[in-house]
DNA sequence: GTATTATCTAAGTCT
DNA sequence: TAGATAATAC
């Protein structure tokens, strides 16, 4: 049975074969970690362990998918389908949907994303009458998140004297109350945030003995990837799950621990041997990914960290190219150099776009890179930043889906109750919200029975609310009987979203409409994929198409990295180093190697934080297979103004035998004249002048220029004197002209004289509703 | 109540 | 610089 093990080296094979008892695999970068994990799973199955008794947890969907695919290749599809492989979040979400009623949640609970959480917190802060500048929603959420991940409940938080003292000192004494209110409201809305998926899983295993026993017996073998990134909460869950059998295998690399900011505890891996005295430890130290140069450089950097497990990563690979260091006068120039270097690299090494990655410390750095790549027509893909599912128009439609599935979902309700505009504004919502809080009801309860409550709303508004609630209910009724795509399409049309976006003919509006169509296409694909998958499976052959609820479960935990288009993938990858963990590329550019950027200025005051930055740099270096380029700029725009930058200390930590020293620039490397970048031809060649140039009269100073623009606009306004007609006898079908919107045709009229409202279709800007007493219309014809 | 404009402020990493 | 929010015109 062991010929499939022959491809492994000796340590890998041992690590795979030791099936029982606690095992820790310390896997250096590029040492075949995923391979060991997948072979281990395969080996478990071939040794007779039932697939559904195996639980394998990763941090990203991508890693989970990859692992599943590779297991399928070894053991075949049928067995592999039943293994529980997934991210911590997705696996626990699955368990929690099964066990939800034990915790008092609906099984179709909503998963709040960060945006939802922040806006919910913001509401609470406002209700408490607190200052949003002191209690910044982002920071508050951060604090709540860290608390949850350290197993601190609101009650513990509030009763902990140390925590309270800390909050007093930072002038935020009511954080605990906000935390408590936030938890309560999420529960009331039938919603869990990302941390709740972990927190509630732990709660389930702690408080419900039946559930604990069930899952302890179900998951007889537990495997954890990227163990160095687990936090206290995840560790607690995993420990409980594995407590009976202790068949737990953790794989990790302390040198790649880069999530301490999220509560990851490097001690989990460093102290693991103490927790399990009979732990078997295997060290994978041979790197198969990178050249000797890259491995050597990475080792020389990580040596500077005090806190680490002993390990010696080495490689049999060729020495390879030295690491290049690019120095640029500005961030934009840095982008240009990198883009051109990629251009050369493709030609010289016979590589494709997708063989190149640009890695940076912060998302904000992507802009300069993007612009430069676009200028020379190199296709790229940005990972992270705002993902498809976070775009406004996509979130809007999804909010309707979420509301249909779980009407208690308050975030979704607030989002769509007045989009597209239907006359239910802020004042109305405030009244409903207040009443809901006072009566301890959900907003949906009030809205869906609006006639029964006296909220001091006008009859007109009540009827609008009634119509809205009726519409949502009509969707909910169809949930089970209609497939995801069918219902999604109905919702997009009958809510008016489709039309609203279609009518907007501006370039942004057009792309929004396209995004909406893309979302609908995505649901269609999802439906098709599902029926294929159902077909493969043996005994769960349901013919029913997936419902919208299934679709929402599928996308709630998706990130940008999961939405790759396989047909169009020859692109340069742009991402943060965090996002690059676990990936590899032939050629890697690490940009922005400057003090206060990388390492981040927030990290340089503590040794722990600085060591984490260094591990981050280590991760970046070890992504590369053949060649690393490092780059830094001497000036850079940050929060709007130009700042001077020093090269990063990490540059000096690389053993210089692995480096080609910075190229001394002889001038703008291409002949195209540079615009406004500060380059000057002097008598000793080109030089860069980053002080404001005093020579060369150019355009007037910015302030003056703005004034001139304003003046000319004002002048224009006066000239174009627009004479409006009396619109008393305006009729449907008339051609009209509006001062700003241009020519249009009246589609519809409603309301009495004073408040008469016209729906007009304008050729340039699309459909608008106008109040006639304000809008100045000129009647052109009948 | 809605749409446009002016002003403010923020950029650390992610499920 | 850009996105989010407040102010204000319609």
Image (cartoon, coloured by chain):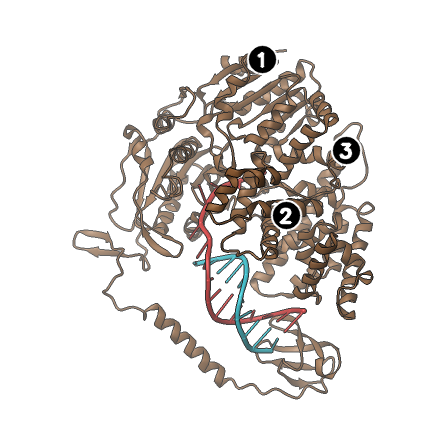
Chain colours: A brown, B red, C cyan
Instruction: Tell me the SS state at disc 1.
Output: helix
Q: Residue at x 76, y 44 (%)?
A: A547
Question: Where is residue A588 drawn, in percent x and y?
Answer: 41, 37
Residues tagged 2 and 3 counted as in contact (Cβ below 8 A): no
**Disc 2 chain ID:** A
Label 2, label 3: how far apart the Cα atoms are: 46 Å
Q: Nearer the viewer, residue A571 or A422?
A: A422
The residue indicated by pointer 2 is A181
Disc with the residue nearer the chain's start (2 vs 3) = 2
Q: Residue at x 56, y 27 (%)?
A: A225
> Which of the 4 image quadrants contains residue A569?
top right
- Looking at the picture, do discs 3 and 1 lie on one chain? yes
Residue A535's mark? 3
* Discs 3/1, front: 1
Considering only vertical position in the picture, is A278 above or below A121?
Answer: above
Instruction: Tell me the SS state at disc 3.
Output: helix
Label 3, label 1: how far apart the Cα atoms are: 34 Å
* Discs 2/1, front: 2
Label 2, label 1: how far apart the Cα atoms are: 50 Å
The residue indicated by pointer 1 is A17
Considering only vertical position in the picture, is A571 above or below A299?
Answer: below
- Looking at the picture, do discs 2 and 1 lie on one chain? yes
**Disc 1 chain ID:** A
Q: Nearer the viewer, residue A576 or A21?
A: A21
């Amino acid at each position: 049975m062991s010929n499939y093990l022959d491809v492994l080296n000796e340590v890998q094979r041992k690590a795979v074969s030791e099936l029982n008892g606690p095992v820790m695999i310390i896997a250096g970068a590029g040492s075949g970690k995923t391979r060991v994990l997948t072979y281990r799973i395969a080996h478990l199955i071939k040794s007779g362990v039932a697939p559904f008794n195996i639980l394998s947890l990763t941090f990203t969907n991508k890693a989970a998918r990859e692992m599943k695919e590779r297991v399928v290749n070894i053991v075949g599809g049928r067995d592999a389908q039943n293994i529980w492989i997934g991210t911590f979040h997705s696996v626990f979400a699955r368990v929690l949907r099964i066990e939800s009623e034990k915790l008092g949640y609906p099984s179709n609970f909503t998963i709040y994303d960060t945006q939802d959480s922040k806006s919910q917190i913001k509401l609470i802060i406002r209700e408490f009458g607190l200052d949003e500048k002191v209690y910044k929603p982002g920071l508050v959420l951060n604090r709540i998140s860290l608390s949850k991940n350290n197993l601190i409940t609101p009650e513990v938080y509030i009763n902990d004297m140390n925590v309270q003292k800390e909050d007093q000192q930072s002038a935020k004494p009511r954080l605990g109350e906000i935390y408590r209110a936030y938890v309560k409201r999420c529960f009331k809305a039938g919603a869990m945030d990302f941390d709740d998926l972990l927190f509630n899983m732990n709660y389930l295993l702690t408080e419900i003995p039946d559930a604990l026993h069930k899952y302890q017996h179900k998951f007889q073998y537990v495997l954890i990837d990227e163990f160095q990134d687990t936090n206290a909460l995840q560790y607690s869950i995993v420990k409980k799950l594995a407590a009976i059998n202790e068949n737990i295998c953790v794989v990790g690399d302390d040198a790649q621990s880069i999530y301490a900011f999220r509560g990851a505890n490097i001690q989990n891996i460093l102290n693991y041997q103490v927790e399990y005295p009979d732990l078997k430890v295997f060290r994978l130290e041979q790197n198969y990914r990178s050249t000797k140069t890259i491995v050597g450089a990475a080792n020389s950097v990580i040596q500077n960290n005090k806190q680490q497990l002993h390990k010696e990563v080495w490689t049999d690979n060729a020495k390879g190219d030295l690491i290049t260091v690019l120095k640029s006068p500005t961030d934009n120039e840095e982008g240009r150099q990198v883009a051109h270097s990629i251009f050369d690299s493709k030609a010289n090494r016979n590589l494709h776009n997708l063989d190149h990655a640009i890695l940076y410390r912060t998302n904000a750095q992507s802009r300069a890179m993007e612009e430069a790549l676009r200028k020379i027509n190199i296709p790229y893909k940005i990972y992270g930043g705002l993902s498809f599912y976070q775009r406004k128009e996509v979130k809007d439609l999804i909010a309707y889906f979420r509301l249909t599935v779980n009407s208690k979902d308050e975030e979704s309700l607030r989002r769509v109750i007045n989009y597209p505009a239907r006359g239910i504004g802020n004042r109305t919502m405030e009244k409903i919200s207040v009443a809901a809080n006072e009566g301890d009801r959900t907003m949906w309860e009030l809205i869906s029975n609006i006639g029964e409550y006296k909220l001091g709303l006008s009859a007109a508004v009540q009827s609008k609310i009634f119509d809205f609630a009726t519409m949502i209910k009509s969707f909910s009724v169809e949930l089970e009987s209609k497939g995801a795509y069918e219902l999604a399409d109905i919702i997009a049309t009958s809510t008016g979203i489709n039309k609203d976006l279609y009518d907007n003919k501006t370039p942004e509006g057009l792309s929004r409409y396209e995004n909406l169509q893309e979302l609908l296409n995505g649901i269609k694909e999802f439906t098709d994929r599902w029926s294929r998958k159902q077909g493969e499976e043996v005994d769960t052959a349901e013919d029913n198409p997936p419902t919208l609820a299934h679709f929402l479960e599928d996308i709630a935990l998706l990130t940008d990295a999961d939405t790759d288009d396989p047909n169009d993938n020859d692109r340069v990858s742009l991402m943060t180093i965090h996002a690059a963990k676990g990936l590899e590329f032939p050629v890697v550019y690490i940009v922005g190697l400057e003090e206060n950027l990388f390492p981040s200025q927030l990290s340089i005051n503590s040794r722990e934080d600085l060591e984490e930055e260094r591990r981050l740099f280590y991760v970046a270096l070890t992504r590369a297979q053949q060649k690393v380029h490092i780059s830094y700029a001497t000036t850079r725009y940050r929060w709007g103004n130009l700042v001077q930058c020093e090269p990063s200390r990490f540059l000096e930590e690389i053993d210089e035998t692995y480096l080609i020293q910075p190229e001394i620039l002889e001038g703008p490397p291409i002949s195209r004249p540079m615009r406004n970048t500060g380059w000057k031809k002097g008598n000793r060649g080109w030089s860069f002048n980053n002080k404001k140039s005093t020579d060369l009269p150019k355009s007037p100073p910015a302030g003056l220029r703005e004034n001139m623009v304003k003046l000319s606009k004002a002048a224009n306004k006066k000239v174009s004197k627009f004479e409006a007609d009396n619109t008393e006898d305006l009729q449907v079908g008339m051609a009209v002209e509006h001062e700003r919107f241009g020519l249009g045709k009246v589609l519809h009229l409603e309301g009495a004289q004073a408040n008469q409202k016209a729906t007009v279709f304008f050729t340039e800007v699309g459909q608008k509703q106008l109040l006639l007493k304000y809008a100045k219309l000129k009647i052109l014809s009948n």
